[in-house]
């Protein structure tokens, strides 16, 4: 039987240099509970190091947390990657460590890059600037995410920076991806005008860097359970499963 789930598929934590220090795993999970969010994807810039603690807390609270990252490719295009297995996350982290262009973080300028435990104690600090680019193309990144069984989606395609649109001038109709993410400001009209809905399934995330923004842009998923395998099936609409950004749902007009 299919059920409906609400997902925020683009969430930063305290680890992102631009992420608020309030975005600790404990705060994210309590905020998600209050907002009745069923699924969260943790997507810090070029790092998965805060995922494990959020996943653990999510399990205790009955919220599914997919680990992942928002990678910055060689083209300076942000792309989301989601994984379910911790072993895949670990392998993906090694790939990120290998390909991140190494620029020292200046925390006073860019912000802190720490990851914390369930009680907000600092566990570690990333020394390399996480918003730098990886020395890997969009295509190479897609291949690595797929090799590890993950889901790959270019981020905020409608945004004027770090998007397919801003870096390549358009969304290539033959882009290798499982989905395309739209930002909180994308409208149904804009999506239709550009024909993005015809290229790949669309997903939405809040891109929250502060707790208040969590859940501001959600995706409604119709599937059997909250596993990543079900999400993959929903993206290709197997047996009635579906994926719809909430803000793109058509509201019935007056007759
Ligand atoms: Zn981004
Ligand atoms: Zn982001």
Image (spheres, helix red, strand yellow):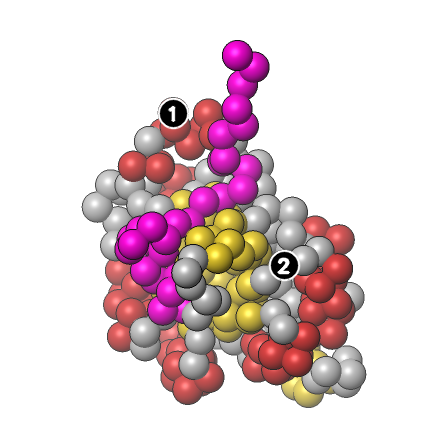
Disc 1 target residue = 193
Label located before the other in sequence (2 or 1): 2
The reply, left or right, for residue 221 in relation to residue 179 is right
The percent coordinates of residue 71 (x first, y second) are 45, 63
Using the image, tell me which numbered label, if any, was put on residue 44: none
Region in magenta: 228-255
Disc 2 target residue = 37
Dividing the picture into quarters, in which one does residue 31 lie? bottom right
The reply, left or right, for residue 39 in relation to residue 115 is left
The percent coordinates of residue 81 (x first, y second) are 42, 65
Instruction: Decide which of 168, 120 is in the foreground and name it.
Output: 120
Q: Which residue is depicted at the point 56% across and 70% down?
A: 64
Question: Which secondary structure, mark 2?
Answer: loop
The percent coordinates of residue 72 (x first, y second) are 44, 60
Q: Nearer the viewer, mark 2 or mark 1?
A: 2
Above or below, 118 against 22 in this view is below
């Amino acid at each position: 039987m299919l059920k409906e789930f609400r997902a925020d598929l683009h969430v930063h934590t305290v680890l992102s240099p631009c992420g608020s220090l309030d975005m600790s795993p404990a705060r994210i999970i309590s905020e998600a509970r209050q907002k009745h969010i069923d699924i969260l994807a943790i997507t810090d810039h070029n790092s998965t190091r805060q995922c494990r603690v959020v996943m653990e807390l999510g399990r205790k609270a009955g919220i599914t947390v997919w680990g992942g990252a928002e990678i910055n490719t060689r083209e300076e295009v942000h792309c989301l990657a989601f994984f379910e297995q911790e072993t895949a996350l670990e392998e993906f982290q090694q790939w990120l460590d290998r390909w991140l262009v190494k620029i020292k973080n200046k925390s006073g300028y860019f912000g802190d890059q720490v990851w914390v435990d369930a009680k907000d104690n600092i566990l570690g600090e990333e020394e390399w600037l996480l918003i730098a680019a990886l020395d890997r193309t969009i295509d190479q990144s897609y291949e690595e995410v797929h090799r590890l069984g993950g889901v790959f989606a270019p981020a905020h395609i409608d945004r004027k920076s770090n998007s397919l649109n801003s870096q390549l001038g358009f969304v290539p109709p033959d882009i290798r991806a499982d989905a395309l993410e739209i930002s909180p400001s994308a409208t149904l009209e804009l999506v239709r005008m550009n024909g993005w809905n015809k290229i790949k399934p669309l997903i939405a995330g809040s891109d929250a860097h502060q707790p208040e923004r969590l859940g501001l842009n959600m995706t409604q998923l119709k599937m059997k359970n909250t596993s990543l395998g079900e999400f993959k099936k929903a993206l290709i609409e197997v047996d009635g499963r579906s994926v719809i950004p909430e803000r793109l749902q058509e509201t019935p007009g007056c007759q």
